[in-house]
Amino acid sequence: MLGVAFAMAGKGGAQGAGGLGGMGALVPLILMFVIFYFLLIRPQQKQAKKHKETLANLKKGDYVLTTGGIYGRIFAINGPVVILEIADKVRVKLAKGQVARLATPEEAQPPKTEG
C-alpha cells in the first residue's frame, strides 16, 4: 500500500510545479516593491524635498498659506520661527514647518466687504 502512494507522488517533489523553486515566489514580491516605489515612495520623497526647499527659501515679505489655512505675509523669520502678519498690526508666531506653500498677494488679501 505504501508503494502505491510513492508511485502516485510523481517526480521532482515541490519543484515540479514552479520550475524556479524559491525564486518563483520572490519575483511577484520584487515586482510589487518596484511598483510601490514608483507609485508611492518616490513621489512622496520628491514632494518632501520641494517643501523643504520652499521653507529654506522663505524671506521677509513673502505671502504664504499655513497648514491651518491662514493666509498672511511674513513679517520676520527667526530661525525655526516665522512671524506672520495676518492683518494690519496682527502678528502670529508659528513654526516654519507649518508653512504649507507660497501664496500670491491676491490670495492673501482679505475679502472686500460691502457696506
Image: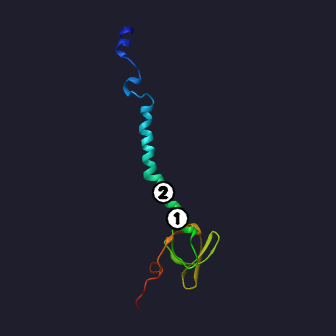
The location of residue 18, given as percent across then percent down, is: 38, 28
The location of residue 60, given as percent across then percent down, is: 58, 78
Residue at position x 58%, y 75% in the image: 59
Quarter of the image holding residue 52?
A: bottom right
The location of residue 114, given as percent across then percent down, is: 40, 89
Tally of numbered tags: 2
Q: Nearer the viewer, residue 61 or 7?
A: 61
Q: Are marks 2 and 1 in contact (CB under 8 Å)?
A: no
Q: Quick one: quadrant of the N terminus?
A: top left
Q: Residue furthest bottom?
A: 115
For the residues marked 2 and 1, what is the alpha-carbon distance in whole angstroms? Answer: 11 Å
Give above or below for 67 relative to 23: below
Q: Quick one: quadrant of the C terminus?
A: bottom left
Secondary structure under badge 2? helix
Quarter of the image holding residue 29?
A: top left
List the residue tagged with mark 2: 44
Local crowd at mark 1 within 10 Å, few (<14), some, or many (≥20)? some
As drawn, the label of residue 51 is 1
